[in-house]
Amino acid sequence: MPELSRSQVLVYGAVAIALLLVGARAIRAESGGAPAAAAAASSPSASGGFSLKSGAGSDIVVDVAGAVRRPGVYRLPAGARVVDAIERAGGAAGRAMLEGINRAARLADGQQVMVPERGPGGSIATAGATAEDGPISLGSASVEQLDTIDGIGPVTAAKIVEYRDQHGGLASVDQLDRVSGIGPATMESLRARLQP
């Protein structure tokens, strides 16, 4: 067998060390030992936008808005709840009316979590858009807010909120066809007024 030169030994040694490091990193990633990487993948970028990291196949991305300390788009693990999204956004702001939302509801990918503000006299103040200005969020709308939409009365609004709470939220407006009292004609008229 031919003898190896010093440079060949160094190259083989460097390759072996690199393979060991890659293997150790892969083992650590499989065992969930990379909390710093997970935290970095779930935080907004310095430019105020959201940076998507690859390799997190079971994560969901949600938009947290309203009365929270750091509104923004966040990555959370699949199965996370509304309370987890609020915590990730820095917690509720002092003006938040947490009893206006179901904090135990499961989150769906692409969902918006709107934390309502406490208005005068303890009422819910709309955070931004009103019923006339823009779409209402299915993920956080109260029965009263849903009742303001033409085609949805108080009974149907209550059924929507009940369905949302039982099934961990609504990922799309199309899921409303599973709620009794909403047919295809009503669905079409609601698309412009509602968002997940």
Image (spheres, rainbow, N blue to C red):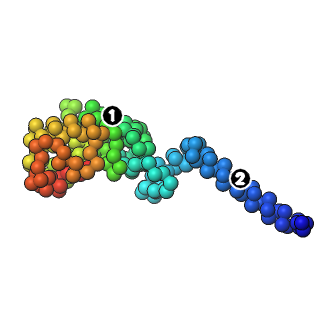
User: In front here: 40 or 167?
Assistant: 167
Q: Left or right: 186 with respect to 18? A: left
The amino acid type of the residue labelled 1 equals: Ala
- Please rate how many residues cluster around mark 2, counting C-alpha atoms within 10 Å: few if below 14, some from 14 to 19, many from 20: few
The amino acid type of the residue labelled 2 equals: Leu
The relative height of residue 74 versus residue 117 in the rendered view (above or below) is below
Q: Which mark is residue 20?
A: 2
**Quarter holding residue 124:** top left
Q: Is residue 164 visible?
A: yes
Which numbered disc flags the more N-terminal residue, 1 or 2?
A: 2
Q: Position of residue 69 (x, y in %)?
A: 39, 42
Q: Quadrant of the N terminus?
A: bottom right
Residue at image point 66% right, 54% down? 22
Residue at image point 10% right, 43% down? 181
Q: Left or right: 44 with respect to 186? A: right
User: In front here: 104 or 122?
Assistant: 104
Residue at image point 9% right, 49% down? 150
Residue denoted by label 1: 104
Q: Left or right: 195 with respect to 90? A: left
Q: Is residue 43 visible?
A: no
Q: Position of residue 149 (x, y in %)?
A: 12, 47
User: In front here: 50 or 81?
Assistant: 81
